[in-house]
Image (spheres, grey):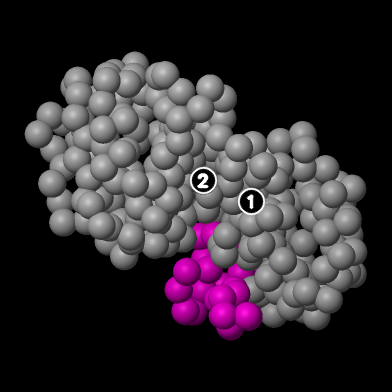
Amino acid sequence: MPELAEVAWYARQWDAGLGQRVVAVRVREGARVYRGADALVLSKSLVGRVYEGVALHGKQMLFCFSGGGWLGVHLGMTGGLESAGPGGGGGRHDHLEVVMERVVLIFRDPRMFGRLIWEESEGEPGWWRELPPGVLTRGFRVDCVAEVLRRRSGTPLKALLLEQEFFPGIGNWMADEILWRLRLPPAVPAGGVDAGSLHREVRAVARGAMRTIGRDWSDPPAGWLFRHRWRDGGTCPRCGAGLVRETLRGRTACHCPGCQAA
């Protein structure tokens, strides 16, 4: 599933339509991605509006159109955004095609785990304003992290990092990267973790991912676990030990048994 930086990269694919007016909208009526919006209402409401910009929060995007039109997008596991020239689109899994004056903006999702939300309001939708503080915002504070660790003290830290109500945008590979930097195993109980150190590494990994993946889809530096965790037989870039891949609460966790000993 796309994480914070991947979501930022996908959002940028629609930059080609900034400042342009919507001239037509094509929807795949009945597609499960419209469980948060009426496909026909969306298609009629978008026409004539100008695409003005996008806001990001964790794994979610909010696209702003003139006249108070807000399109929320959650990519789910297999969703993606792209832009194409005039006449583009029409693919089997293209569930939304926003035809602009000089470009077509496309939402594609083969397995339809993603979701589209449409709302018209003077300001940002209420559901967006109620989201928890993003990990790179001022609202994501050490004392808030400490409270989460206290309340969920018995939860394995890897599992806790994946809970979007506390760490929006952090997904599987980012959680592994944070734990590797902290030299902690995935199953360590959250209650024994230093809040300041966790806060620091969450933000450091998020910033680094945004500078690389979020900017141009390039990989983070070779010294990151990221470059070594995806395949069996990978080795720790810090100590050279063979990496271990295991399942923790239904999710794959990759860690170094040497650097991250219990």
Which label number is shown at residue 139? none
Q: Position of residue 133 (x, y in %)?
A: 71, 42
Q: Position of residue 128 (x, y in %)?
A: 59, 39
Question: Is 180 left or right of 66, judged from the image as shown?
Answer: right
Mark 2: give few (<14), some (14-19) or many (20+) Cα within 10 Å.
many
Is the C-beta separation of discs 2 and 1 under 8 Å? Answer: yes
Q: Secondary structure at mark 2?
A: strand
In which image quadrant can residue 107 be found? top left
How far apart in space, not on screen, are marks 2 and 1 (Cα)?
Answer: 9 Å
Among numbered discs 2 and 1, the one appearing first in the sequence: 2
Q: Secondary structure at mark 1?
A: loop
193 lies above or below 216? below
Quick one: 123 or 164, which is closer to the camera?
123
Q: Position of residue 151 (x, y in %)?
A: 87, 65
Furthest toward the top, the residue is: 19
Quadrant assignment for the C terminus: bottom right
Residue position for label 1: 168
Query: What is the magenta range?
Result: 225-254
In which image quadrant can residue 42 be found? top left
Question: Is 216 left or right of 102, judged from the image as shown?
Answer: right
Tell me if residue 178 is in the magenta stretch.
no
Residue 128 visible, this orientation: yes
The residue type indicated by label 2 comes to Gln
Q: Residue at x 57, y 80 (%)?
A: 250
Mark 1: give few (<14), some (14-19) or many (20+) Cα within 10 Å.
many
Residue position for label 2: 60
Question: Is 68 left or right of 80, judged from the image as shown?
Answer: right
